[in-house]
Image: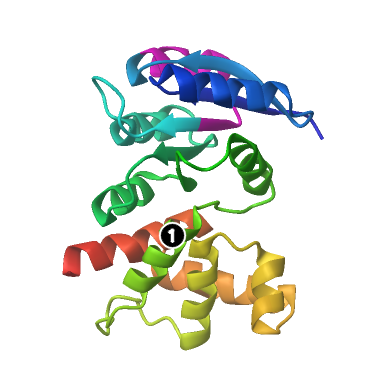
Amino acid sequence: MENISVMIVEDDEIVKEELRDALDQSPECRCVGVFANGEAALANVTSLNPNVILMDIGLPGMNGIECLRQVKKIVPKTSVVMLTVFDDDGRIFDSIIAGANGYLLKRTPPSKIVDSLLDIQNGGAPMSGQIARRILELFRQSPQPDETHGLTNRETEILDRLAKGYTHKQVADNLFVSPETVRCHLKNIYQKLHVHSKSEAINKVFHLRTILK
């Protein structure tokens, strides 16, 4: 497996150096670029084409969420993990709707942030524990009949766990079903929601719930 190429977009010098040092010490990752603002990152993202971007939300000028939206248009296959000191609902949902593949608080140890990159490459969606708990709380709050587009209870359970960052195997183990059963349910979820990926399914349900709140 090739090293995971990572771009850092962060204006805090201390955080930036801690992340770069953690990447340099990891045999699985390599830092391909460090930028202090979204505009510079967008100017270089095509040529660098990183596997993952660690993106600060509170950037000067263009904020991280807007930069994320632009990144997803330019290099849609690049995963983006949002880094922030905030854990409020608005930023969480805005990031997910914009296409974020993970959401971590900056107080997460740099070594754990590097571990999250490996999780992403294995199909995970890393989130700090308190973020994941808040998402699940909001996700389970009194759904209206049309919010889930007719998803069954089991399909909702699977989407719950995927939103928390579980891998397909972890979902299967947690629900005591086979990985093939999970894949079958995912296929049905995609058809009902008219989407083509796990992130699109999560984004669509969260987006609908944000509108209906």
Above-or-below relation of 32 to 102: above
Is residue 122 rendered to the left or right of residue 135? right
Q: Which amino acid does label 1 sit on?
A: Gln
Q: Total of numbered circles in the picture?
A: 1
Is residue 35 rendered to the left or right of residue 61? right
Q: Which residue is drawn at 61% across and 31% down?
A: 51
Q: Where is residue 122 in the image (x, y as percent from the top left)?
A: 69, 50
Image quadrant where residue 100 sits: top left
Q: In which quarter of the image is the C terminus?
A: bottom left
Q: Residue at x 33, y 31 (%)?
A: 64
Task: Assign a secondary structure to mark 1.
Answer: helix
Indicate yes or no whether the magenta region holds residue 113: no
Q: Which residue extends farthest right?
A: 1
Q: Which residue is drawn at 47% across and 45% down?
A: 104
Residue occupied by mark 1: 130
CA neighbours of label 1 inside 10 A, class few (<14), some (14 to 19), many (20+): few
Above-or-below relation of 9 to 87: above
Indicate yes or no whether the magenta region holds residue 47: yes
Q: Which colour scheme is used?
A: rainbow
Q: Residue at x 47, y 41 (%)?
A: 107
Q: Where is residue 123 in the image (x, y as percent from the top left)?
A: 64, 52
Classified by dominant secondary structure, the portion drawn in magenta counts as: helix
Residue 196 or residue 124, whichever sits in front: 124
Residue 206 or residue 166, whichever sits in front: 166
Q: Position of residue 174 (x, y in %)?
A: 66, 78
Q: Where is residue 40 in the image (x, y as percent from the top left)?
A: 39, 12
The magenta segment is 40-53
Q: Quadrant of the N terminus?
A: top right
Image quadrant where residue 202 sits: bottom left
Image quadrant where residue 176 sits: bottom right
